[in-house]
């Protein structure tokens, strides 16, 4: 389910994005970035519409997904309403 990030307070959004970008396994390529840079990048992706905050009900966790990944998940969900 999409999380309406525009409705979150700035502090809540920053905390959520910081938690997401500092998770184990998050890869930002060959060049290392600071946590602040990662949060700024994530926020910019949200603002531009390239990324979506998404709540995974099975994992009970928020994540940042590309817009196309969310569209795929929603298509799958509509075709399998029992899941």
Image (spheres, rainbow, N blue to C red):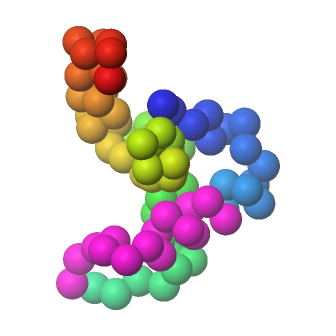
Residue at left 47%, top 75%? 22
Quadrant position of residue 18? bottom right
Q: Nearer the viewer, residue 39 or 16?
A: 16
Front position in the image: 58 or 67: 58
Task: Answer above or below: position of 2 versus 60.
Answer: above
- For the point 25% across and 16% down, which residue is it? 80
Q: Residue placed at 67% from the left, 65% from the top?
A: 15
Who is closer to the viewer here, 17 or 23? 23
- Kindly identify the residue that appears in the image at 66 percent across and 62 percent down: 14
Task: Give the x, y percent position of residue 31.
Answer: 28, 85
In the rendered image, the vertical position of residue 69 relative to residue 74, given as above or below: below
Of residue 69 and residue 43, the one placed in the foreground of this image is 69
Numbered label tally? 0
Q: Look at the image and say whether residue 28 sits in the magenta stretch.
A: yes
Q: Which residues are magenta?
A: 15-30
Say which quadrant the C terminus sits in.
Answer: top left
The answer to whether 52 appears left or right of 6 in the picture is left
Q: Position of residue 39 (x, y in %)?
A: 54, 67
Query: In the image, is residue 56 part of the stretch drawn in magenta?
Result: no
Residue 78 vs residue 59: left or right? Answer: left
């Amino acid at each position: 389910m999409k999380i309406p990030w525009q409705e979150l307070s700035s502090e809540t959004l920053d905390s959520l994005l910081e938690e997401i970008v500092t998770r184990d396994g998050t890869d930002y390529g060959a060049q290392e970035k600071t946590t602040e840079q990662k949060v700024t990048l994530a926020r910019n992706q949200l603002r531009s519409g390239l990324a979506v905050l998404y709540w995974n009900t099975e994992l009970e966790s928020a994540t940042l997904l590309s817009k196309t990944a969310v569209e795929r998940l929603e298509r799958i969900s509509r075709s399998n309403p029992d899941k």
